[in-house]
Image: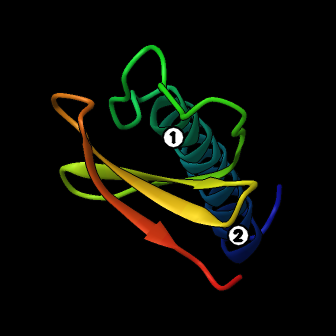
Amino acid sequence: MEPANLRFLRLLVTALTSVMMVGLVVVVALIVIRLNADGPTMPDQIVLPDGVSATALTIGQGWWAVVTDDNQILIYDQLTGALRQNVQIGQ
């Protein structure tokens, strides 16, 4: 027969291990759910001026900006896809 302290310790370790395993499953499930969530909405096709290609894209609240290879920032409306502003960067 084992002492009462040892029996209590064994039950405590078993309970803590079970709680840790359940917590790990919950954390992994939340990460998977978060990664599968829909991201920001963008138009299916970005219409850029002829001869220009995009090097970066930034999405803001109600707008998105495309940085082009000819040093321009094209700011588009997120809902309509219309060009709001064209900003020239440096030279």
Q: Residues within 10 Å of mark 1 (few under 14, many from 20)?
A: few
Residue at the far bottom in the pictured view: 90
> Which numbered disc, 1 or 2, marks the residue that appears first in the sequence?
2
| Residue at 69% across, 39% down | 52
Which quadrant of the structure image shows residue 82? top left
From the image, which quarter does the N terminus lie in?
A: bottom right
Q: Is residue 83 above or below residue 56?
A: above
From the image, which quarter does the C terminus lie in?
A: bottom right
Which kind of residue does numbered mark 2 sit on? Leu
Q: Nearer the viewer, mark 1 or mark 2?
A: 1
Q: CA distance from mark 1 to mark 2?
A: 26 Å
Q: Is residue 23 above or below residue 52?
A: below
- Estimate the x, y position of residue 15 in percent, counting from the top left: 59, 53
Colour pattern:
rainbow
Q: Is residue 37 above or below residue 26?
A: above
Q: Is residue 79 above or below residue 6?
A: above
Element on which disc 1 rests: helix
Q: Are marks 1 and 2 in contact (CB under 8 Å)?
A: no
Given residues 34 and 24, the one toward you in this image is: 34
Which kind of residue does numbered mark 1 sit on? Val
Residue at the far top in the pictured view: 44
Element on which disc 2 rests: helix
Name the mark on residue 26.
Answer: 1
| Residue at 64% across, 47% down | 24
Q: Residues within 10 Å of mark 2 (few under 14, many from 20)?
A: few
| Residue at 56% across, 42% down | 31
Given residues 72 and 17, the one toward you in this image is: 72
Name the mark on residue 9.
Answer: 2
